[in-house]
């Protein structure tokens, strides 16, 4: 009896593996197709540029106003005392600004002749003046409502 | 011009394919898929090393690098032409020796690869610049190198985010931009795609070289249907390129140890791929150290005393170019790393000697929330079942290959664990931000290990055929 069971298992073993392989192939195919369909839906719902392209398009002309290489300062909402900001948004914008102005290097702070200012437009007309007064920097050129080229305090 | 910029990727690809073919064709062991899939990442690697030296000796504005590449391609084409008989057998041999099951599995894996490519293109359309690390580290460095001209060294300063990271990817992208004269965003995604899909080719090609056709195609099916593979590939991070080089080095070492009569070409390629892993990402330098230890140990164990200096030399020849470039970069340009400060190792040593840190890392890994793979169906359970069903047969001649891949995976994982122990960042945050990518770096090599280890499926299919055939009269 025991030998018969063993024989059945032995005979059935290749079929068991073959079934598992077929199941694996079927599920893999399904998984691939499902991912494709999900991403196709996301693509169909795309409206306008992605975040990086939009930022790059908006800001790339500021590069023309800045030196070709070297280091300049970078000042943003996260440097203003007691100002509410999203820390991850600030870091992302800093890195996006670096991505746009490369190979020019951005260093946080005002200890350079030129400083790139990136301040969220809150509609407060006094905000930029307050920044200038507080940090002792001077506006050279407003590139947009949010991006400014400032004279820093040089090293 | 945007689509034409793809053409600028052809010279390094051709260079790598011809170089790999020149080394492997005389062994009469390689196949078309393996040579092409190994050749493309190797070509990008060699080209980026040479471009780095070109930048150093001349500068990015100095024209002529194209002629250097073209000269190398012409030399390799001539050398290959002299092996034309072998080349012919190589191309025709790939189409022979297949039965119906192999063809069916081949067609299915090709179909899944096509669906994978379509999914990859969808992801690229959603994020053409890649995700965070892509534009914060890799593509921004490519922009710096392509735009800075004679001032290219000025960007390797501590103020730049991760300026110590190696340059294989940024230089590969910058090279194409410089040659095409435009910063086409098609290039970074194309490079990312090539690394993603050649990984599947290396996996399958290696298993086919080991005469495991069905396992090879199955491995490709599992790898390419893993949602995270296509997703991470499309992000334009360096993790999938690093995974490709870790897999390539492991596969070539595995094949060297499986062909002890003629391992030279495999050893040179294994050394080269391990070196290029170090030129791709800092974790690759950890792999490079582990690889040198494991490969040297295996060579000392397997080969006769008389032969092992020669074998070590072959490994060293492969390592030479990338290791020289890495050392040159690290000692002359790269600023300090954020995890290991080589100028002051006392915090690192203190962390390594603190049992509390180990406990925190273990807790951090247990609390790691993301899992792995992104499957919505239980594919890992099926792979595990097949693995268990086919496990009992490890051929004696495969033991060194299996041992080397296992050791590389285990040591590399221990290395990752120790990075978390010494990290100056908050441990749980560091784990949550990086552990998925670290696992992805090892995933294709893990699949290679599984599919080399299990019993050849061909044997079972043959059993089924024998059982179902009518009895002899």
Image (spheres, coloured by chain):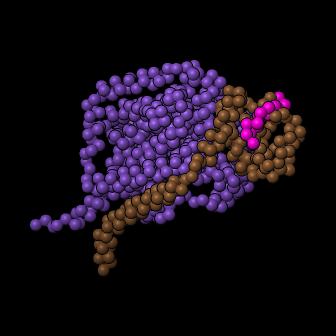
Chain colours: A brown, B purple
Please report the residue visible at 51 percent of the width from the left and 42 percent of the height from the top.
Answer: B189
Q: Is residue B385 above or below residue B69?
A: below
Residue B358 is one of the magenta-drawn residues:
no
Q: Tally the numbered discs.
A: 0
Specify whether residue B85 is in view: yes
Residue B175 is situated, as x and y percent measured from the top left of the image, at 52, 30
Q: Is residue B105 above or below residue B293?
A: below
Please report the residue visible at 29 percent of the width from the left and 33 percent of the height from the top.
Answer: B87
Q: Nearer the viewer, residue B139 or B424?
A: B139
Q: Is residue B149 above or below residue B224?
A: above
Residue B47 is situated, as x and y percent measured from the top left of the image, at 49, 30
Location of residue A30 (image quadrant): bottom left
Q: Nearer the viewer, residue A12 or B147?
A: B147
Q: Residue furthest bottom?
A: A1
Please report the residue visible at 65 percent of the width from the left and 48 percent of the height from the top.
Answer: B418
Please report the residue visible at 81 percent of the width from the left and 34 percent of the height from the top.
Answer: A139
Residue B276 is situated, as x and y percent measured from the top left of the image, at 52, 36
Q: Nearer the viewer, residue B203 or A34?
A: A34
Which segment is the magenta one?
A140-155
Residue A147 is one of the magenta-drawn residues:
yes
Query: Is B244 on the left or on the right of A111, as rendered?
Result: left
The quarter of the rendered structure image containing the C terminus of chain B is bottom left
Location of residue B86 (image quadrant): top left
Q: Nearer the viewer, residue A5 or B67?
A: B67
Residue B354 is situated, as x and y percent measured from the top left of the image, at 73, 51
Specify whether residue B215 is in view: no
């Amino acid at each position: 009896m025991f030998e018969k069971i063993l024989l059945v298992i032995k005979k059935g073993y290749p079929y068991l593996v073959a079934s598992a392989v077929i199941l694996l192939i079927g599920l893999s195919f399904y998984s691939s197709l499902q991912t494709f369909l999900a991403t196709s839906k996301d693509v169909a719902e795309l409206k306008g540029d992605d975040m990086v392209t939009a930022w790059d398009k908006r800001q790339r002309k500021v590069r023309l106003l800045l030196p070709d290489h070297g280091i300049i300062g970078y000042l943003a909402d996260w440097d203003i005392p007691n100002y509410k900001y999203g820390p991850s948004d600030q870091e992302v914008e800093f890195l996006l600004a670096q991505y746009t102005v490369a190979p020019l290097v951005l260093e946080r702070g005002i200890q350079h002749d030129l400083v790139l200012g990136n301040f969220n437009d809150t509609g407060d007309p006094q905000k930029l003046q307050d920044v200038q007064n507080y940090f002792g920097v001077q506006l050279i050129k407003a590139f947009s409502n949010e991006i400014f080229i400032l004279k820093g305090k040089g090293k | 011009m945007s689509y034409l910029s793809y053409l600028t990727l052809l010279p390094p690809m051709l260079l790598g394919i011809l170089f790999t073919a020149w080394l492997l064709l005389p062994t009469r062991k390689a196949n078309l898929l393996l040579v092409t899939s190994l050749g493309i990442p190797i070509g990008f690697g060699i080209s980026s090393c040479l471009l780095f030296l070109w930048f150093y000796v001349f500068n990015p504005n100095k024209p002529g690098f194209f002629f250097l590449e073209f000269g190398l391609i012409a030399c390799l084409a001539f050398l290959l032409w002299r092996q034309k008989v072998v080349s012919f057998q190589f191309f025709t041999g790939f189409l022979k020796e297949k039965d119906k099951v192999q063809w069916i599995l081949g067609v299915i894996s090709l179909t899944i690869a096509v669906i994978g490519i379509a999914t990859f293109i969808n992801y690229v359309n959603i994020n053409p610049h890649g995700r965070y690390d892509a534009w914060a580290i890799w593509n921004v460095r490519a922009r710096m190198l392509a735009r800075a001209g004679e001032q290219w060294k000025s960007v390797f300063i501590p103020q730049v985010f991760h300026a110590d990271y190696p340059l294989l990817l940024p230089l590969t992208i910058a090279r194409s931009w410089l040659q095409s004269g435009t910063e086409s965003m098609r290039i970074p995604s194309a490079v990312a795609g090539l690394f993603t899909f050649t990984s599947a080719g290396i996996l399958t090609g290696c298993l086919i070289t080991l005469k495991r056709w069905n396992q090879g195609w199955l491995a490709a099916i599992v790898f390419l249907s893993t949602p995270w593979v296509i997703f991470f590939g499309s992000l334009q991070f360096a993790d999938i390129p690093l995974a490709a080089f870790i897999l390539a080095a492991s596969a070539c070492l595995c094949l060297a140890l499986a062909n002890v009569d003629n391992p030279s070409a495999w050893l040179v390629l294994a050394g080269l791929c391990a070196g290029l892993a170090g030129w791709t990402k800092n974790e690759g330098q950890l792999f490079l150290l582990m690889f040198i230890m494991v490969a040297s140990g295996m060579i000392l164990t397997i080969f006769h005393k008389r032969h092992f200096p020669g074998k070590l030399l072959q490994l060293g020849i492969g390592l030479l170019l990338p290791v020289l470039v890495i050392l040159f970069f690290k000692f002359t340009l790269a600023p300090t790393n954020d995890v290991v400060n080589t100028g002051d190792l006392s915090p690192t040593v203190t962390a390594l000697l603190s049992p509390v840190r180990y406990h925190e890392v273990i807790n951090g890994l247990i609390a790691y929330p993301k899992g792995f793979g992104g499957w919505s169906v239980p594919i890992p359970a099926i792979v595990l079942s097949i693995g268990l069903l086919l496990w009992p047969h490890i051929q004696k001649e495969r033991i060194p290959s299996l041992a080397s891949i296992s050791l590389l995976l285990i040591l590399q994982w221990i290395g990752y664990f120790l990075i978390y122990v010494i990290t100056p960042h908050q441990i749980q945050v560091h784990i949550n931000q990086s552990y998925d990518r670290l696992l992805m770096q090892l995933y294709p090599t893990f699949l290679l290990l599984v599919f080399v280890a299990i019993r050849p499926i061909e044997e079972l299919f043959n059993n089924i055929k024998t059982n179902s055939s009518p009895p002899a009269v």
